[in-house]
Image (tube, rainbow, N blue to C red):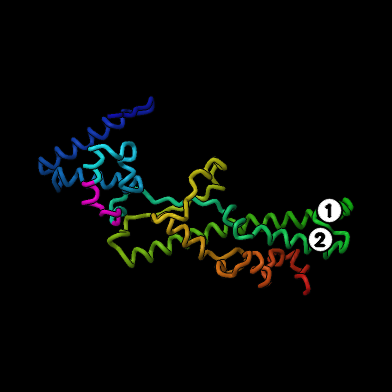
Amino acid sequence: MTTTSSPEGPDDFQVAVTAVTHAIRAINANQRPGDGAEFITHLLATVAANLGSSEAVTAGRPGSWEAAGVGDLLRSTVGYDDEYLLTYRTEPVEIVVNSVYELDDLGMFETYEASTNHIGQTLFGDGWTPSRDRLTLDQLEQIEDAEGLLAELEHRDRIDYQQRFTAAVQARLEQLRNDDPDRFPGHLTVTVRFADEDPNYPASNDDLTDGWGSDLASVLYQHARETTPLPGSDTAPDWAAGQRHATTLLAAGHWPHLRIPTLAHYGTPTP
């Protein structure tokens, strides 16, 4: 048996022993409902739920006889495939997203670049190239002013996307709860944390939610990723289009600079 301790607090094992002993003494004295076996079973199921799976409880030594006994007890409580695991969860389910990565994958940054190129071509004609090596200092300042406005728009778009993404997660959770309240109880909460807003960024990227899993966090993440409207539009990404989402946005007339009053007069490229 391994116990853990730290200079900041008492030993985890001793804290757990004290709490459980106190609770079962209270049960045996009829000072709280239930029985000791029920309490231990519920406690173990809650730990497994907060860890994310029954397997996580025995991950340190899964082949031991202790692990086999714990596994049998958990399966009798949360189901063979953890189907009722979330019923016992007391910690919020956390979804970790990098909105910069998401918007880059959606091609949004290509749309800001397309606006910059269009404005450059409108202002300077053949003198415009992405390298800007033909521009005068005054012309460079002019295009950099436009880029600054687009950068501010990109920041606003990112905040808006984060809010819409979070709303999509919560809406899907409510749908699941309405469809199966036994599996997704009312006390279950889900939080969304954006790694690119974390003070520890970019180290916080290590916690990003994997959208390929079957756990609740992965399911909600994938749903939000597929249904959250793209910045500058009220439509979700068209994943069946077979082309970059940026191309779809621009073809529909959703050029970023059109949403900036001082740049909207540049219009869009003529066919």
Task: Inspect the image, locate mark 2, and give the three-letter code of the amino acid beneath it.
Answer: Gly
In this picture, is 94 found above or below 168?
above
Badge number at residue 132: 1
Q: Position of residue 81 (x, y in %)?
A: 30, 54
Inspect the magenta stretch and tell me whether residue 82 lies in it: yes
Q: Which residue is mark 2?
A: 120
Q: Residue furthest left?
A: 29
Q: Quadrant of the C terminus?
A: bottom right
Find the magenta span and give its range: 72-83
Q: Seen in the image, is 48 located left or right of residue 25?
A: right
Q: Residue at x 21, y 51 (%)?
A: 76
Q: From what the image shows, is residue 160 above or below residue 270?
A: above
Q: Are marks 1 and 2 in contact (CB under 8 Å)?
A: yes
Identify residue type, mark 1: Arg
CA distance for labels 1 and 2: 9 Å
Residue 45 x %, y %: 26, 47
Q: Is residue 75 magenta?
A: yes
Q: Position of residue 175 (x, y in %)?
A: 38, 66
